[in-house]
Image (cartoon, rainbow, N blue to C red):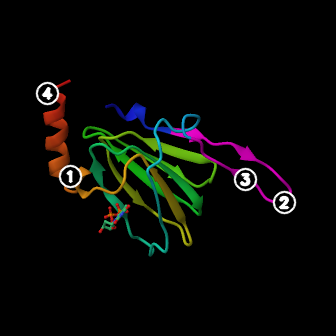
Amino acid sequence: MHLNSCRLVDLPKIEDPRGNLSFVEEGSHIPFSIERVYWIYDVPGGETRGGHAVKKQQEMIVSLSGSFDVVVDDGTTTKRYHLNRSYFGLYIPAGFWRQMEDFSTNSLAMVLSSTRYDEQDYIRDHEGFLAYKKNSQQYI
Ligand code: TYD
């Protein structure tokens, strides 16, 4: 799976003098059914989250408040996305290593996931991820 399969999705933005509104719909903006939603907040300055890969889970990450970077790694190349608007979602298919860093004060990251939480789906060491990619490429 190439890094190009990760993409920033433009979410609807309904502008209104009372305040703006955005939304995500399965089938329209994300190519998976949402099984779980989690969010990351109160991140101390300089901390990183999510240094791991997942084998089956697809996800979309939205910065609901503040900003942070998501670094996506396909085992060969990395790409950094700066998320700072609540009407952009970063879609990440299964099989990528990804890390979240450079969180601003009061940032709020929402993650829409295609699966329930399953620790067996995670690869938490980078060497293991590289071995997994090498191994899975033998079967393509
Ligand atoms: P972890 O995956 O390490 O968080 P991150 O990738 O954001 O750094 O998860 C931290 C802890 O929370 C770990 O013990 C697993 C647990 N957890 C759940 O129970 N359910 C969930 O949906 C998630 C994402 C994590």
Q: Which one is in front in this view, the residue at disc 3 or the one at disc 4?
A: 3
Q: Marks 2/3: CA distance?
A: 10 Å
Residue 102 x/y as whole percent: 45, 63
Q: Indicate the quadrant containing the C terminus: top left, top right, bottom left or bottom right.
A: top left
- Characterize the local packing of mark 1: few (<14), some (14-19) or many (20 or more) Cα atoms within 10 angstroms: some
Three-letter code, disc 1? His
Q: Nearer the viewer, residue 34 or 105?
A: 34
Q: Nearer the viewer, residue 122 or 52?
A: 122
Name the residue tied to disc 1.
Answer: 126
Residue 119 x/y as whole percent: 25, 58
Q: Earlier in the sequence, mark 1 or mark 2?
A: 2
Name the residue tied to disc 4.
Answer: 138
Q: Earlier in the sequence, mark 4 or mark 1?
A: 1
Residue 41 x/y as whole percent: 49, 70
Name the residue tied to disc 2.
Answer: 18
Label for residue 21? 3
Q: Marks 1/2: CA distance?
A: 46 Å
